[in-house]
Amino acid sequence: MIYTEMTRRAMQIAFEAHKDQVDKSGLPYIYHPIHLAEQMQDETTVCVALLHDVVEDTDISIEALAAQGFPSDVMTALKSMTHDPAVPYMEYVAVIKNDPIARAVKLADLRHNSDLTRLTKVDEDAKNRCERYLAAIAFLEA
């Protein structure tokens, strides 16, 4: 992890946003964005990794994050990574492919979410999600 004023701010926002959430196996959700952030190579991708699910999974808006002073490259990547349910999944992934910052974080996100060993129960929904994520990985890597 890279520790700067900006990454610390992103970490605090992510922690507060996700503090009452758990993942599909019951673990604190914050472990997921931290896991991604630890794989990133620079300040910008660390911030995007930490914040990648904040807008999508909490009541914090993209405007509220922008008001925290994050630079435009962070905000552009976060906008790309926030999936509008009205947009088909692979169209959403295609937008991410064009943004190198979002692409790096999304690949780490998809790999982590495809790790079925994280789950206490692997059902058909989990297998279907994993198939969709593996297809997205292949698309982003092509």
Image: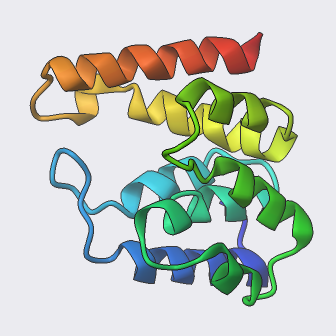
- Residue placed furthest toward the front: 86
Q: Position of residue 88 (x, y in %)?
A: 55, 31
User: How many numbered dots are placed on residues in this image?
Assistant: 0
Q: Is residue 55 visible?
A: yes
Compared with 78, 3 (above or below) is below
In this rendered view, identify the residue nearer to me: 40 or 78: 78
The quarter holding residue 131 reads top left
**Residue 94 percent coordinates (x, y):** 73, 28
Measuring 54% from the left and 81% from the top, which residue is drawn there?
13
Q: Is residue 139 above or below residue 2?
A: above
Residue name at image x 49 percent, y 60 percent? 56
* Left or right: residue 120 compared with residue 83: left
At x 63% / y 11%, what residue is drawn? 138
Measuring 42% from the left and 83% from the top, which residue is drawn there? 16
The quadrant in which the C terminus is found is top right
Taking depth in this image into account, of 65 and 7 the one nearest to the observer is 65
Residue 12 point in image, percent of width and height: 54, 83
Residue 4 shows in this picture: no
Q: Which quarter of the figure is the N terminus placed in?
A: bottom right
Depicted 58 relative to depicted 92: above or below: below
Instruction: Give residue 113's position: percent from left, percent from top.
Output: 41, 34
